[in-house]
Amino acid sequence: MASAPATAPEGTRPASGRPEKLRLGDVLVQQRLISQEQLQQTLELQRQTGKKTGRLLIESGIITDELLANGLARQLRIPFVNLKTFPFRADVVKLLPESAARRFRALVLEDKGDSLLVALADPLDLSAYDELTRLLKRNIGIAAVPESQLPLALDRLYRRTEEISGLARALEKDLGDAVDFGELTANAGLEGAPVVRLLQSMFEDATQVGASDVHIEPQETGLQIRVRVDGVLQMQTEADKRVGPPLAQRLKLMAGLDISEKRLPQDGRFSVRLKDTTIDVRLSTLPTNYGESVVMRLLNQGGGMRRLDAIGMPADMLARFREILGRSSGLVLVTGPTGSGKTSTLYAALAEINTAELKVITVEDPVEYRLPGLSQVQVNDKIELTFARVLRACLRQDPDVILVGEMRDAETAEIGLRAAITGHLVLSTLHTRDAVSTPFRLLDMGVPPFMVGTSLQAVIAQRLVRLNCDSCAEPHEPTPQEQAWLTSMAPAGETIVAKRGRGCSACNGTGYAGRQGVYELLEMDAALTAAATRSDPSSFLAAGRARMQGKTISHHALDLVRQGRTSIAEALRVGQDIDPAD
């Protein structure tokens, strides 16, 4: 529903000053949004639970928070505002400190000079109105907003960039005043130390915006800290280059790495607790010209793993994939570049087949997700605990299903294929451009053709595309290049109305919010198996492409364009990545 204007229409504008005291239930009955009977049932439930009337009405499904806010707006003659599309101004929002905004569930929307327009989740909360008037030292008018939109808006608008910059400056001051760097490092272990508070704020900001990675990068003139959101890096803050070493040292201590070693790359992991969420952090350091570069992959232990039917795979492909996962033996490969969601797809598959009747072992470097019921092994090359060595040991553990994190070399691939031949279902990943070229990547690695032909069951290739922001997506006129791609991909005569986000406060001006996988599935049949066994590339490619006609990654991306879920630019990017000649 579109937001109402930020000022009430003429004739319904409320008198300035404190709103009148009303009972929410009476307002909703008067607006005919709920019945008297529903109100009485809710009031009885309120006496039992102590929860607020509005919350109980929403939880019971009697009314939505949007209808509730609209009803209050009409009754109180105040504007209703949709926070998803409202054009916020950062300087106006920051008139109210974050702590107060979260405490009173309020946002400053407009500065009208003599007064401020403030969004309140509960416009009937008179104590919140009084406190906000005192804090802001201005007359305020109230706007009604859907309660569920407020937490997301608060997280989006109160980015911790200013706090992070301030903590970085505090750390710079400590560095400037410190006589002994060793003393500073020792003090870094204290919870109140600037380096600790800086890291805490960095992690909180990164999780608020849904970042997958945090990059701490020393440059010649300073230190830049960036976060990757929906596959694209965004600047978090810039600081003095002296901040880099204590940050890197503190992170290495948390990951149990050698803090005295700055000449060699190191990898580690640790967990951080943020509010009610535990974040698994994979840390990698790299020595550069100007100091150690640190990259951290963030994995949400509570919400990082998705169900197989929620990853966006087309329904017909999902049905075939489930049938393949039900087999007792064979190799299933998921391919694509780094960061294309291969591990997420495999773990979604494991979660589906993980039952008490099956023994499942995973061999990974590193273990990205923890799934109850699995035996998960972390590869460690330092002690010669390699993929090949662990795989051999796994076969003596009587497994039904084996997940190999990656087919990195010929030895690992050959052992995995032998396991598939001898009665095990083997799942793994490989870096290839598309599904059709995957079998010949195995042959290039030195795996015997007969093993590829007899053990490989199916190949899934995938990419990630950014999705249009729901709040600002609008019809988009294709560019000549985009139109040429549509013409080459869509059936003759089909008209596609494409959409693209224009950029708004909900998506930080990018036009995109979230990502989804796009997939293609190649199942091995008798003809493909024979061509692979003969090591006959031309016959295999011809047969494979015939079977993939209309079912490639590009065609899946085109379907998302038809649905208005992604832009032509995103679909075109995926298509060019797979076949630059197109």
Image (cartoon, rainbow, N blue to C red):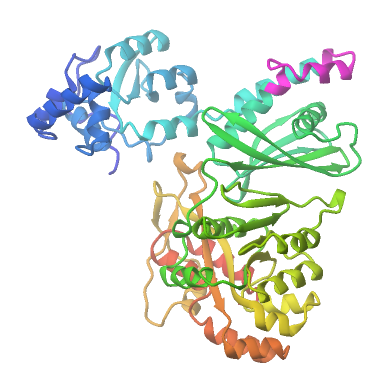
**Eyeballing the image, is 263 above or below 338?**
above
Q: Describe residue 87's horizontal placement relative to residue 24 as left or right.
A: right
Q: Describe residue 401's horizontal placement relative to residue 25 as left or right.
A: right
Q: Residue at x 69, y 17 (%)?
A: 191
Q: Describe residue 177's horizontal placement relative to residue 475 as left or right.
A: right
- Residue 190 locus on image (x, y percent): 73, 16
**Eyeballing the image, is 218 above or below 50?**
below
- Residue 187 locus on image (x, y percent): 79, 16
Residue 84, quarter of the rendered image: top left
- Residue 451 locus on image (x, y percent): 72, 80
Which stretch is magenta?
Answer: 176-196
Between 9 and 404, the one lying in front of the other is: 404
Q: Quadrant of the C terminus?
A: bottom right
Please tell me whether residue 565 belongs to the stretch shown in magenta.
no
Looking at the image, can residue 97 be seen? no
Residue 197, quarter of the rendered image: top right
Between 510 and 407, the one lying in front of the other is: 407
Between 392 and 317, the one lying in front of the other is: 392
Q: Residue at x 54, y 74 (%)?
A: 521
Q: Quadrant of the N terminus?
A: top left
Residue 531, quarter of the rendered image: bottom right
Q: Describe residue 258's horizontal placement relative to residue 68 as left or right.
A: right
